[in-house]
Image (cartoon, grey):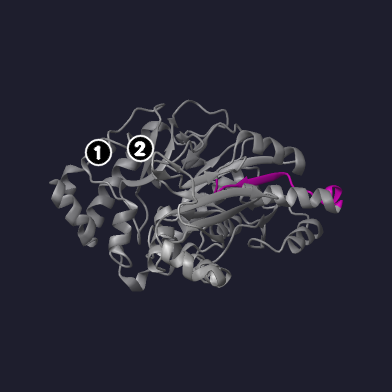
Amino acid sequence: MRNYYQPEIEQMPREDMIKLQNQRLSSQVRRVYKNVPYYRNLMDQKGVTPNDIETIADLSKLPFLTKDDLREAYPYGMLAVPLEDAVRIQSTSGTTGRRVVAFYTQHDIDLWEDCCARAIVAAGGTKQDVVQVAYGYGLFTGGPGLNGGSHKLGSLTLPMSSGFTDRQLQFMSDLEATILCCTPSYAEFLAETIEESGLRDKIKLKAGIFGAEAWSGEMRARLEKKLGIKAYDIYGLTEITGPGVSFECSEQTGMHINEDHFIAEVIDPNTGEVLKDGEKGEIVFTCITKQAFPLIRYRTRDICVLSRSECSCGRTLVKMSRLMGRSDDMLIIRGVNVFPSQIETVLIEYGLSANYQLVIDRVKHADTLEVRVELTPEMFSDMVKGVEGRERELREKLKNMLGISAKVTLVAPKSIARSEGKAVRIIDNRKI
C-alpha cells in the first residue's frame, strides 16, 4: 500500500511541477530583489533584474549565495520580511565566531513541518504510530523539524531530544515507540544498549529516520538487523530549512526533493557550470516558498547526483543520491558542522600557532574529536608545569566556538607529522 502525506504534490505530473516552480521562482526573485538589499546588490553586480527571470531555465543567470555571504550579512542582512513577522530562529555554527542564523515566519514553519510529515509518511508513518524524536532540540533543526512533522501527521510524539539513554529506552519500551528519529550513530548506540540490556523483545520499532551525518549502506544494514526496522535517510540544512529538504522512500535509492519548495541544481564546484542529471557535482538549492529567509542559488558544498528516473513508490519528485563528499573542508561530528578554520581562530586568539591536527574517531558508536596543538618553543619551555590547566582552558574555548566538546592535547613543537612540509591536518578514523 502506497502512502503519501500530500499526494497532489508528491505525485504531481512533471509538467505541472515545472509550471508551479516557474511561477513561484519568478515571484520569489521579485520579492527578494525588493526586500533584501544584500541580494539585490549581488544581482545588480551581475547585471540581472527580476524581469530576466521568468522560468527555471533562467536560474543560471542569478548569482550564487555562499556561507560567506550569510556570515557577512549576519544577523539581519538576509531577512526578507519585517522583523515582527518572524517568529523563530534556528542556528548552526558559522566558519568563524559568527553563527548562521535562519529566520522563520509561522508560514515557513508550517511548510517545513509539512515536508517532515511527508518524510514520516514515506517511512510508513500514520496517526497510529508513536514517533520518538531523539534529535537535539533548541537551535539545532533536527528535533524541532521532526517533532513538527509528527504533530502535523497526528502521531503521538515523544520529544526526547538527544542523550539520556536510559530514559530513551524506558519510553521506547513503555510507550511502544514505532518510529525512531535520530542520528545514525546514536541509533547504533541505542541498538547496542538495547541488546546489552536484554530489551530486544520489548522494542516495537518498525522504522528509523536517520540523518544529520554521513552513514553507509553497511551501517544501514546493521541498524535494520539490530533494531528490526527499515532505515530511511533524510536530508536538510539549517540555511534552507532543516531536515525535510529531501527524504527517502521505500525504494531506498535516493532522497526525493520537495520540489514545490526547493529547486535543486547540481553544478561543477570549480566552474559553477550547471551539470546534467546523473552527473556528480555540488548541489545548489533555491527556496521558492520561504518568506523570512529565502535563499536563492545557495551553494551547499554537498556533493551528489540528481536522478529523475521513475520511482516504484509512485512519487514524481526528483531524487538526490546519498552525499558523496564535500567541496570544502567541513566535517560533521556528532551531527554538528565543524570547520578547521573555526579551530584556527580559537588557537590564534589563544596565542598558539596554527600547527594542529584533528583526530576524529567513533568510539561505542559516538564520534570523538581530539585537537592536538603544537606549542611554540617559547610556550613549551614556560608551560611544562601548567599544561593541564592550559588544555582545560582551551577545551572550554573550543566548546564555546564549536558547540561540542573536544579533547585537547598540547604537544611539543614540530611533533605533528608533516608531509612535504605541511602538517597532516585531519585524521578521520571513523568506520561508517
Residue 103 visible, this angle: no
Q: Position of residue 12 (x, y in %)?
A: 45, 36
Residue of label 1? 60
Whether residue 230 is in magenta: the answer is no
The residue range painted magenta reads: 198-213
The image shows residue 281 at horizontal and vertical percentages of 38, 34
The amino acid marked with disc number 1 is Ser
What is the distance, in whole Å, between disc 1 and disc 2 at their CAs? 9 Å
Q: Position of residue 182 (x, y in %)?
A: 62, 52
As rendered, which of 70 and 290 lies closer to the eye? Answer: 70
Quarter assignment of residue 241: bottom left
Q: Image height check: is 53 above or below 357?
A: above
Label 2 near label 1: C-beta < 8 Å? yes
212 falls in the magenta region? yes
Q: Quadrant of the C terminus?
A: top right
Residue drawn at x 80%, y 56% as measured from the top left:
173
Q: Which mark is residue 265?
A: 2
- Residue sitting nearer the eye, 66 or 416: 416
Counting the numbered discs, the total is 2
Upstream in sequence: badge 1 or badge 2? 1
Crowd class of label 1 (few under 14; some 14 to 19; many from 20; radius 10 Å): some
Going 40% across and 47% down the picture, which residue do you hit?
A: 261
Locate the N terminus and report the quarter of the image it occupies: top right
Residue at image location 63% in from the left, 48% down from the top: 362
What amino acid is at disc 2?
A: Glu
Residue under the image location 38 percent in, 43 percent down: 421
Q: Secondary structure at mark 1?
A: helix
Relative to 302, is 180 on the left or the right? right
